[in-house]
Image: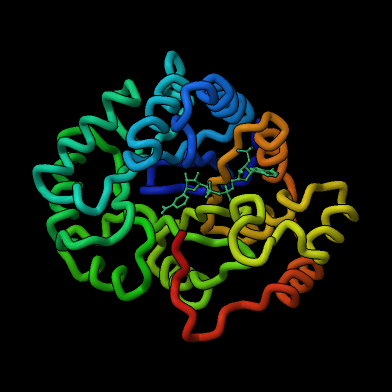
Amino acid sequence: MASGRTITIGGDITVPVVGQGTWRMGEDADDVPAEVRALRAGLDLGLTLIDTAEMYGEGGAERVVGEAVAGRRDDAVIVSKVYPHNAGQRSARRSCENSLRRLGTDHLDLYLLHWRGNIPLAETVEVMEDLLAEGKIRNWGVSNLDVDDMDELWSLPDGTRCATDQVLYHAASRGAELRLLPWCRAHDVPVMAYSPIAQAGRLRGDLLASPVINEIASGRGLTPAQVALAWVIRDSGVLAIPKAVQPEHVQQNAATLDVRLSDAEIAAIDDAFPPPNPDEPLDIV
Ligand code: NDP
């Protein structure tokens, strides 16, 4: 089971600071059984938050999640996301209902605007609040919004009811760190870090091949991915949602909940992957 490192989202959802992603799941029928097994194994290990989106596999990932939580809905905290072009009054309700049907549930624990599009934020907030009132969602939030967008959101009626901002964050991509993370801390908004192991090193500069990360890993009997993940969750206020299908990956990610990097290890990673300069914007996949 997961250790005691938890985070509270929206005031009423408390989950371990490592959850489970689902991007690329549900795209190939042959892979679905292994994907369902992986998510169930993660739930068994206490990785209760599952992140998905209507975009992933055009609904396929939500179906995989639905299969994984069948008969055990209360073990999971389900996060899904609406496409920006569907985040208006009528289309968001339809999107939400389609997500609920694919997931086989009557409510989402958290519903996020996937990224900012052309529909005014005010309209999205309004429809999110309507869905809340109808009991279809328990909380709502956003994704890929930088500080200027968050400021705008905070100026809107009910905008401060946003429960999270889900953003790209790993050691080789620290654009969130300079302004957004402090902003979220100051406004009590938990951050969900996506691609926390840089898609197994495929994003930006092969994080998992870094000599520093590998040295720390071998010194502690960890894998490089565990070190990368432990770095993301080193401070409170951040939850990471690695996606894993291979059983050993799920186990390693759960075990990372017990890993705390030392100040010296964090400093060594800082040296190898310096914090962003003031102009660096939030990165996006
Ligand atoms: P991740 O950083 O989670 O990397 C996933 C890759 O890492 C997979 O290839 C997986 O392999 C591998 N992996 C997982 N655990 C380990 C481990 N312990 N050791 C070695 N390799 C490992 O990338 P994602 O982009 O998938 O991000 C995670 C989640 O964040 C997504 O699935 C999605 O839910 C969300 N997301 C949100 C975005 C947004 O715009 N809001 C954008 C991108 C992602 P395998 O599967 O074979 O086990």
Q: Which residue is drawn at 31% across and 23% down?
A: 105
Indicate whether 100 appears above or below 255: above
- Residue closest to the eye, 29 or 121: 29
- Residue closest to the eye, 23 or 28: 28
Split into 4 quadrants, where in the image is the N terminus?
Answer: top right
Q: Does residue 262 show up?
A: no
Q: Where is residue 122 in the image (x, y as percent from the top left)?
A: 14, 61
Instruction: Locate residue 118 relative to residue 262 in the image: left or right.
Output: left
Instruction: Locate residue 138 relative to residue 30 in the image: left or right.
Output: left
- Residue closest to the eye, 81 or 136: 81
Looking at the image, the residue that sits furthest to the right is 219
Q: Position of residue 258 (x, y in %)?
A: 72, 45
Q: Residue at x 31, y 43 (%)?
A: 111
- Residue closest to the eye, 277 or 260: 277
Instruction: Locate residue 134 relative to residue 198 in the image: left or right.
Output: left
Indicate whether 43 appears above or below 284: above
Looking at the image, the residue that sits furthest to the bottom is 278
Indicate whether 203 appears above or below 74: below
Looking at the image, the residue that sits furthest to the top is 71
Indicate whether 65 appears above or below 54: above
Q: Where is residue 135 in the image (x, y as percent from the top left)?
A: 21, 33
Q: Residue at x 55, y 84 (%)?
A: 277
Colour scheme: rainbow
Q: In which quarter of the image is residue 233?
A: bottom right
